[in-house]
Image (tube, rainbow, N blue to C red):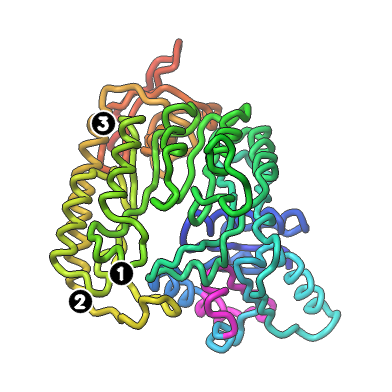
Amino acid sequence: MNRVYIKTYGCQMNERDSEAVAAMLRGKGYSMVENESEADVILLNTCSVRDQAEQKAIGKAGHVTARKRKNPNLIVGIMGCMAQNRGDELIDRLPDLDLVVGTQKFHRVPEHLDAMIATMQGQGPRPESIVDLEEEAGSQNTIRSHVEDKRQVSAFVSIMQGCNMKCSYCIVPKTRGEERGRPMESILEEVRELAAKGTREVTLLGQIVNQYGVREFPFVEKKSPFVQLLEQVNEIDGIERIRFTSPHPVGFRKDLIDCYARLPKLCEYIHFPMQSGSNRILKAMRRPYTIEKFRSIIEQLREVRPDIYISTDIIVGFPGETEEDFELTRKHFEEIGFDMAYLFKYSVRPGTTAEPLGDPVATEVKEERNQKLLDILGKRSLTRNESLVGHIEEVLLEGPAKRGEGMFMGRTRGHRKVIVPASERLVGELVPVRINSATASTLMGELMLEGVEPAPTAYANSI
């Protein structure tokens, strides 16, 4: 009864939460499996930010709980944002569900499973479903465990939980609670431990990451707590690259902009959500900035780091979005020239302030607007990637590529994916790669190691 399979939906924070739960379970003697058919326990870590993500998770949960008719000892649990948002409703909808664990109770999963399994193994009747959703002080400090049985070349580090913003379309403040920052020294200790185990790159995670500690820790020499944290992570031996996600235009000050010029380990990449190019829609979304302010920050970033890569989030079809509003979004999206973007078609989220507005923009209109942005993005990304052909880029090799024998995948400092023929011994190393060809999403290249002959380049068709 100790084999666990975890399936994760949603963002990098959910991935990090799942990883921490897996590490905690391993510490309690559980084993993690890659195939759900081998599992005694199936946990779904869920997302509520988009309706599609919720529907996928609910569908999967229904499918898995149905399997319990053939295997009544199978334990099925739902964790994360959808669990927090829907709570007992999930038990009503899926009566065979065993466990519902909210976003502040991930660290309680091992003890809940222990109790449930002990009861099932002859020490009593099968327990009733467990629903654990209450807020818990200090929960932001519990997501720090990492896998012990393999090296993490690149690792996520959660520095805070929750969000104090009130974006009208967003359910995160309801599912994640108010902003709560971890002590800085605890974060630095975690990063040092990762570095000692061979991690070369860390991504600092927070819902509004640049707001880290603003209510809990002092500014020093006009530097925010987040900038102070970046400075100290930059000093940790073994860590070669630093990223963070996601910042907000609110609180994005000169001290953070200047970090891109003076911190050598901070990669020339930023994910910076725009959401809309219309000030009218931004106001309706309760995003407290103008498109002019947003663009000003980007201009300042490009002044200190001209080669910076920028990705963003856009929502099309927000209630009340007219053709004129979308045209402003299209215009700014194209003029800014994002290198990557997550494009979303608006969906109503229960419990948000936008819910009463309904979903008046027709699906086909959303599809058309979404496609227009995708077309712009594809051209921009291809042009930027093709500009790297013939150049030598520093690539951190992360592991084998999904396709192609002897092929490995890595990323540039600008977060572009690179496929290159290499060997297992180079995984986790920063290697020079000459870029030979490019698509909109992927670069193909060859190693340029001193004393090592480049591998044949006929591999490109295998990608």
Q: Position of residue 202 (x, y in %)?
A: 55, 40
Q: Which dot marks residue 362? A: 2
The reply to whether callout 3 and callout 1 are in contact (CB within 8 Å) is: no
Residue 322 as seen in the image, left or right of residue 102 = left
| Of pointers 3 and 1, the one earlier in the residue sequence | 1
The reply to whether callout 2 and callout 3 are in contact (CB within 8 Å) is: no
Q: Position of residue 215 (x, y in %)?
A: 59, 54
Q: Secondary structure at mark 2?
A: loop
Amino acid of disc 2: Ala
**Residue that badge 1 annotates:** 284
Q: Secondary structure at mark 3?
A: strand
**Neighbour class for label 1 at 10 Å: few (<14), some, many (≥20)?**
some
Split into 4 quadrants, where in the image is the C terminus?
A: top left
Viewer-nearest residue: 406 or 6? 6
Q: Quadrant of residue 270?
A: top left
**Neighbour class for label 3 at 10 Å: few (<14), some, many (≥20)?**
some
Viewer-nearest residue: 74 or 80? 80
Classify 256 as above or below 14.
above
Residue depicted at 43% across the width and 29% down the height = 395
| Of pointers 1 and 2, the one earlier in the residue sequence | 1
Residue depicted at 53% across the width and 31% down the height = 427
Residue depicted at 55% across the width and 62% down the height = 162
Which of pointers 3 and 1 indicates the residue nearer the eye? 1
**Residue that badge 3 annotates:** 437
Split into 4 quadrants, where in the image is the N terminus?
A: bottom right
Amino acid of disc 1: Ala
Alpha carbon distance from label 2 to label 3? 40 Å
Residue depicted at 34% across the width and 56% down the height = 289
